[in-house]
Amino acid sequence: MQEIIKSDFPIERLVYGKADALKIFKDFSEPYKVELINDLDKGSVISFYKQGDFIDLCRGPHLPSTGKIKAFKLTSVTGAYWRGDEKNKMLTRIYGTAFEKKSELDEYLTALEEAKKRDHNKLGRDLGIFMTEEVIGQGLPILMPKGAKILQILSRFVEDEEEKRGFMITKTPNMAKNDLYRISGHWDHYRDKMFIIGDENSPEAIALRPMTCPFQYQIYKNGLKSYRDLPCRYSETATEFRNEASGEMHGLIRIRQFTLSDGHIICAPEQVEEEFKRCLDLSYYFLECLGMKDDVTYRFSKRGKSNKAKYIDNDKAWNETEALMKKILDDIGLSYVEADDEAAFYGPKLDVQIKNVYGKEDTLITIQLDFAAAHSFEMTYVDENGEKQYPFVIHRSSIGCYERTLALLIEKYAGAFPLWISPVQVRVLSLTDRTAEYAKDLAEKLRAVGLRAEIDVRNEKIGYKIREAQLEKIPYMFIVGDKEKEDGTVSVRSRKYGDLGACSFEEIRDKLVKEDRDKII
């Protein structure tokens, strides 16, 4: 690499047709490049970049020459299946980075080390939040008691808030016959992402659900609906399954089985704008409570024109629905970017985007407009004039995938969660065996008012107990000795502020109840 930089090779862009491109890489004995080129259309124009004797497929752009690089570092080596398919050969992937100045490289490497300290894939395991096992499979994490408790806290919070806002909770099957997915369009447009049980060409084939929408539509269809029944708002804390490629999976952020705050609103066309705004407002509220509202950006995901085969073929409906979403977003005054070829196969969507500690962007929450589902499933309602009409469907996830949200919370707070989502909120530490019963009594009183409390009455030095609680990032410690037992007090230690001294048990209990209830970040 040093020799290449010293040679200062100009980096040239070349363009070839498919036939010439194939010849070049066959002559170079590059079977993987040949495979990629063979997948392209016959009339494709293919861009290459050349430096010295080296030539490679690339979209570009590049630096003008290799001499522009002044500092670089190779950062890691991993294995990766060719094209992300575990049936293919395992290749070696080398990661590196380059900068124009050594100071910029040093700054980047320092930031990378800081990111590693917050990486949920390591920190989540160290804190006993989740684990994986090879015998279970890739993309199938196990949530340990602490992780399961956080998801329970979040799901109860979400379900209660959704109910306040008019959503009706459902519980639908995790799988269905392929007939259902043929009607919904998933069989034609989403089958590669689905887990199919049995021969997919058989009428008996069953698939694990990638989303709940076709199931909730059956609830809507169970009985005639009039305009007075609309909007129908259905929500579900749903287990869903998507066949992610092995190379795409990462910790809790991208997995094959996950839990989604899934929901669908079936409404009259004139109600779409108001319902869309209500969905966005709900997501704003959850993001604010989690302290993530300023961490997200917004993407208006459209069909685009380059890959129309991925989408339902109805230009008029696409144009009208994209125009409707743009009007809603502009009326709200939302700052967003537009992205072609990122829509759902049935309509445009607003994606709430967020970056992990390494800067990789993922979708956290999505709100989608669907112009096709009502017609596909023959969902209708009777309007004021007694005429049958087709409703509109809004797909939405209010807090997104719980596992992904948990991963991002681990990274945001470096495992030191706000009190209201901490799996353990208080640990009561006894100084001696004489105060063990007092510690147990205090923990029971904390649990009685809804706080999650543990005790540590082991015969260990108090310094050891405190350090252990600090490593577990527990928000509060109550330390009780003979004096505290006699006075009915506790010595309080805060994860954030250190030693707070002694105070009455009732005083600190009430303070924590308020902090928990108000969801203080």
Image (spheres, rainbow, N blue to C red):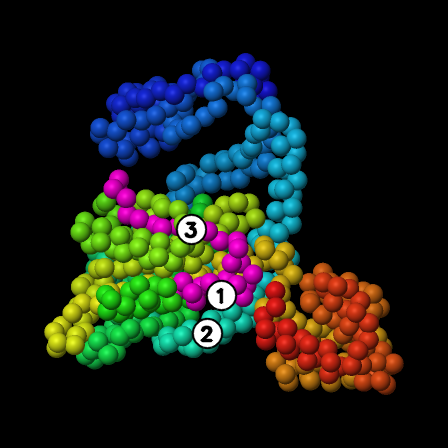
Front in this rendered view, residue 7 or 497: 497
The local secondary structure at tag 1 comes to helix
Name above or below for residue 96 compared with residue 450: above
Q: Say what amino acid the circle numbered 1 marks.
A: Phe
Q: CA distance from mark 1 to mark 3?
A: 19 Å
Pointer 1 with pointer 2, Cβ within 8 A: yes
Pointer 1 with pointer 3, Cβ within 8 A: no
What residue lies at 33% left-to-right and 67% top-to-bottom?
275
Front in this rendered view, residue 54 or 368: 368
Specify which label sits upstream in the sequence, 3 or 2: 2
Q: Say what amino acid the circle numbered 3 marks.
A: Ser
Circle 3 Cα neighbour tier, 10 Å, few/some/many (<14 / 14–19 / ≥20): few
Q: Magenta stretch?
A: 279-307
Is 93 placed left or right of 420 in the picture? left
Is 489 placed left or right of 111 in the picture? right
Q: Say what amino acid the circle numbered 2 marks.
A: Glu
Is 379 placed left or right of 489 in the picture? left
Looking at the rendered image, the disc whose residue lies closer to the viewer, 3 or 2, is 3
What residue lies at 77% left-to-right and 69% top-to-bottom?
493
Specify which label sits upstream in the sequence, 1 or 2: 2
Circle 2 Cα neighbour tier, 10 Å, few/some/many (<14 / 14–19 / ≥20): some
x, y percentage for residue 514? 63, 76
Q: Which residue is mark 1?
A: 286
x, y percentage for residue 224? 19, 79
What residue lies at 40% left-to-right and 62% top-to-bottom?
280
Q: CA distance from mark 1 to mark 2?
A: 9 Å
Q: Which residue is mark 3?
A: 335
Is 17 placed left or right of 111 in the picture? left
Q: Is residue 40 visible?
A: yes
x, y percentage for residue 271? 28, 68
